[in-house]
Image (cartoon, coloured by chain):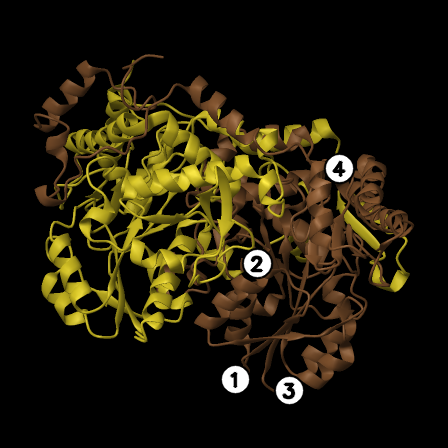
Amino acid sequence: MGGHDTGSPYASHTPAETEQMLDAVGAATEAGLFDIPEEIRFDGEFDIESRSERAVRQEFGGMLNRNNDLTEFLGRGHYDHYVPSLVDHLSDRQEFLSSYTQYQPEIAQGFLQALFEYQSILVELTGLEVANCSLYDAATALGETATLASRVRATTGDRVLVPEHLHEGKRGVLENYADGANLTIESYPMADGAADVAAIEDLVDEDLLLLYAESPTVRGVVEESLSDLGTIADEHEALFALGSDPVALSVLEEPAAVGADVVIGDAATLGLGTSYGMGLGMFATRKEFLRQVPGRLVGAGEDSTGRRAYTLTLQTREQHIRRERATSNICTNQAWVALRTAIHAAYLGPEGLVDLARTCLTNATELADQLDEITGVAAPVHDRHHFREFLARTDQPAQAIVDELVDEGFAVHAVDEHLLQICVTETNEDSTERLVDAVREVVA
Amino acid sequence: MSDELHYDQARWSDEEGYEPLLSEKNTREVAVDTPLPDDLTRDSLELPELSEPELARHYTRLSQMNYGVESGPFPLGSCTMKYNPKFTEDLAAHPSGAVHPDRPEKALQGTLELLGRTSEYLAEIGGMDAVTLQPPAGAAGEYTGVLVAKAYHEHNGDERSEIIVPDSAHGTNFASAALAGFDVVELPSGDDGRVDIDALEEAISDETALLMLTNPNTLGLFERDIEEISAMVHDAGGLLYYDGANLNALLGRARPGDMGFDIMHYNVHKTFATPHGGGGPGAGPVGVVDELADFLPEPQVREHGGGYELFEPTHSIGKVHGFQGNWLVLVKTCAYIARLGDEGLTDASAKAVLNANYLAEQLEYEIPFGPFHHEFVASAGDQDAADVAKRMLDYGVHPPTTKWPEIVDEALMTEPTEIENKRTLDQLAAAFNAVADESTETIEAAPERTAARRIDQVSAARTPRLSWQALDDESE
C-alpha cells in the first residue's frame, strides 16, 4: 500500500503530498486549518491504540467467539432463515454496498430498479397497491403506521388498539411514537392466543383510530379472525393494520382481501438471517394513502431517450423538503437489506417461498407434538395453527429450564413463569430431536 | 494522463428501457397448498422465477448501472462518502456474531463486549459520558435525543414545548422534533453563515427544550460562539444537541462534550466509514452527559462481575428500535475505530479538512463562506446547480449535494473526505472547472455517459407508477 505508514490507512497522502497541498492552500500546518477557539480545542487522547487490520480481525474474532456455540430455537420477531450465498455476493458488490441514496437517478438505475422490484414483491404479497422501499424495522413501522393513521383520519379518534400479546420492543417503540402524536394505546384481550373478537367489539367506539393485529402473532399463532377485525375497523372508520412477514404472507390469506389498510412487519426474515435483531421495516398500504406514506418510494418514469427509467418519487412527503411537516423524519433507511430481501425472494421464487412457509407450519406442529409427549411439558399451549413457533407449558419454572438448556447447547425463550417459547425453521430442524432429548433430561 | 476523468457507465438496454424487470423475464403462478384450512390461505402466488445464474446476471447488470465509492470520486456534501474498508465486512459476517437478541446474557458475552466497547469508544470520541447504540440511523438518533430531552424536562416538572433549529440544518432536525410532539422554532442564520446571537436571544424562552446545532455547520463553518450559545441555552434551562453529521471535521481536534453539548448523535455511516448501502442501513448512536444517562433507551450494556450485562436505565425513555439497532453496522463501526485509533482518527479529520481546502483552492466557482473545514459550499453562479450536477456525472464524478443550504445561490455542497489523494483531487478539480466553462445548452443536455439519460422526475411524480403491477395495469 502506497502513501504513509502513520495516520489513517485510508488517507493515502505521502508527507510530500501533504506539504504540497498545505503550500497550495497557504497553511503552515494541518492544525492551522481548523478554526476552533483555543478554549475548546481537544488536546487529550482517546486512548485508542491504532492496530493493524490483522490484529483487529484477530481481536474482534476472538471477542465474538466468546458467544457460546448454541443451537438457537429463538424467534419472537427475529427469525433465522437460511440465506443463500448468492445474496451475500451480489449485495456486497460495491456498486450496491458503497452507493448513496439515489438522488442522482441517472447514475443509480441499478439500485432503483432493485428497490422497485422489492416494492413490487411486497405489492404481490400484500395485495395492497403501494409499498415503500423500507423503514428501519417492524417496531418503527408500527409507530409510523400510528402516525399515518392520525394524519389520514377525518375524525378526531386517538385510540390505537393492539394485541395483548405483542413484542415488548414493538410496544415500546409504538408508545414513543404515540406520545409524540397524542395518541393512546390500549391492549385488546386474546382468547387462546388469538384476537378475542367479541371483546374487541365491546372495546371499540368512535374514538378508534387504528386496530392492529398480527398473523402470525408474537407467539406464532395464525390469526383466524382477520376479516372480522377488518370489518370492525371499517365500521368505525378506523384503519386496520396487519403485522406479518414475507414468508408467512406467501401462503396466508391476502391482507388486502381481509380489509388491511396497512401491512407492516420484518421483511428481513428473508435476506438477513440472525443478526442480533437488525431488521427491515416492511410497509405497504392502499393507494388512497399514497401522499401520507413515510419513507422513500421508487417510481417508474422516462428518461430523455423515452426509455423507462426509475427515480425516487413523491419526495415532497419527505423531511429534506417538507421538514417539520414531513410524513416522517426517516432519511437513511434499510435499502441494502431490502435489496437482499428481494434477491432472496427471487432466489426462492413462488414455489420456494410456499415450500418454506409450509416448512414453518409443519415443523412447529411436529416439534410441539414431540415436546408434548414429555412428562411435565404440554405443547402447544394454544389450540391454534402455528407458524414457526409455539408456547409450551412446563411444570418446572421456565427460566430454570432455559438456563439448563444453555448448558446443553440450546437457546429457547422463557416468556412467563411456566411458559417456554420455541421457534423452529429450516435452519435448526435437524436439531429438533436433540432438543427434545435435552428438554426431557432437564425436566426429568 | 489527462487532467480529467473519462467515464462511460455500463448500459444494458433495448428500445423500451434498460435491464428488463425480474417480472418481465419470467414469472410463475403456483397454487398454495398447506396444512392450513383453505379460508386462511391465499389460493395462489405469482412471482418471478429465475435460475440462479439468471439472477446472478440480473443483479450484476443492475450493479453495473450503479455508482459506488469505488467507482470514482464521491464528494457529496454532508454525506461523508468514505471508502468502506473490506475487512470490516468480513468481521460483520463472522458467524459467531450471528446471534439472536433474546439469548441469555451468559451466552452472549462476545456480542455484549463488542457493544460495550463501541459505546466506550464513541463516548471518548464525543466527550460524552454514556452512549446508546439502539438508534438505527441519524434521524433516529435525533429523535432519541429529543425524547431524552423531553423526558429530562418532564422529570424535572418542567414541560417545555419548543425546539430551536437553525434554518441551515438538515431537514431531519425539524422532522425529528415534530415527531416527538415539539413545536419547531426556526433560527435565521447570520450574515456570516453562522448562528446569529441576537436572533438566538430572540428565539430562546422558558419554552425552549433544546437547541439543535450542527458544528461545523452545513457551510463547513465552525460555530465560534459555541460557548456563548451554550451558556445562553443553559441559562434558559434548555439543553444543547449536537447533530453529528459533520463530526468528520473534528476528530481529535474538538469534542462536542467539551463545547457544552449535552446530547449528540453519531452518524457512523459517515464518520466511521460504514457503507451507505444505497440509502441504509446506517446507525445513529446517541451520547449524553452524565446527568442524562438515566434517560437513555433500554437496554444499556455495562461491565459487571468480570463480564457484561444488560440493564434498564432508571428513567429510560424505553425503546426506539424493536431490538437493539443495526448490529452489523455497529460491528463495522467498532472495527474501523480500533483500526485507526487516536492517530488514524485525528489524521482522517486533518486530511478531510486539507482535502476540502485544497480542492476549493482550485475551483473556478465562487465559495462565499469560510473558513470551512471538511466541506465547503460553492456557488454555481449563473449555472443551474442541478444541471452542473448532471454534467459532472459525465466526468465520472458523483456530484456534490445541490441547491442546499439555500443561503448560497445554486449551492454545490462539496465534501471530498480524506480518502482522495492529490492526484484524484486534481482530476476532480478539473472536472468541476470543465463544467464551469461549459454552455447552458451542454449542461442541460447532460448526462450523456450514464446508463440512463436525464430522467423526468416531475412527470414520474405526477403519475406515480410504483410497482410492476402498476406498469402492467397501464399497458392493459
Residue wearing tag 2: A169
In this rendering, do the residues under marks 4 and 2 share a single chain?
Answer: yes
Q: CA distance from mark 1 to mark 3?
A: 12 Å
Q: Residue at x 14, y 40 (%)?
A: A41
Residue wearing tag 1: A156
| Mark whose residue sits in front, 2 or 3 | 2
Q: CA distance from mark 2 to mark 3?
A: 27 Å
In this rendering, do the residues under marks 1 and 3 share a single chain?
Answer: yes
| Chain of the residue under the numbered disc 2 shown in the image | A
Q: Position of residue B200 (x, y in %)?
A: 15, 65
Mark 1, other Cα within 10 Å: few <14 / some 14–19 / many ≥20: few
| Mark whose residue sits in front, 1 or 4 | 4
Colour of chain B, in one word, is yellow
Tell me the element at label 2.
helix
Q: Could you tell me the amino acid type at mark 4? A: Thr
| First of labels 2, 1 by sequence position | 1
In this rendering, do the residues under marks 2 and 1 share a single chain?
Answer: yes
Tell me the element at label 3.
loop
Q: Position of residue B235 (x, y in %)?
A: 16, 66
Q: CA distance from mark 2 to mark 1?
A: 27 Å
Q: Position of residue B59 (x, y in %)?
A: 61, 33
| First of labels 2, 3 by sequence position | 2
* Marks 4 and 2 in Cβ contact (< 8 Å): no
Q: Could you tell me the amino acid type at mark 1? A: Thr
| Chain of the residue under the numbered disc 4 shown in the image | A
Image check: A22 left or right of A240? left
| First of labels 1, 4 by sequence position | 1
Q: Residue at x 53, y 45 (%)?
A: A335
Tell me the element at label 1.
loop
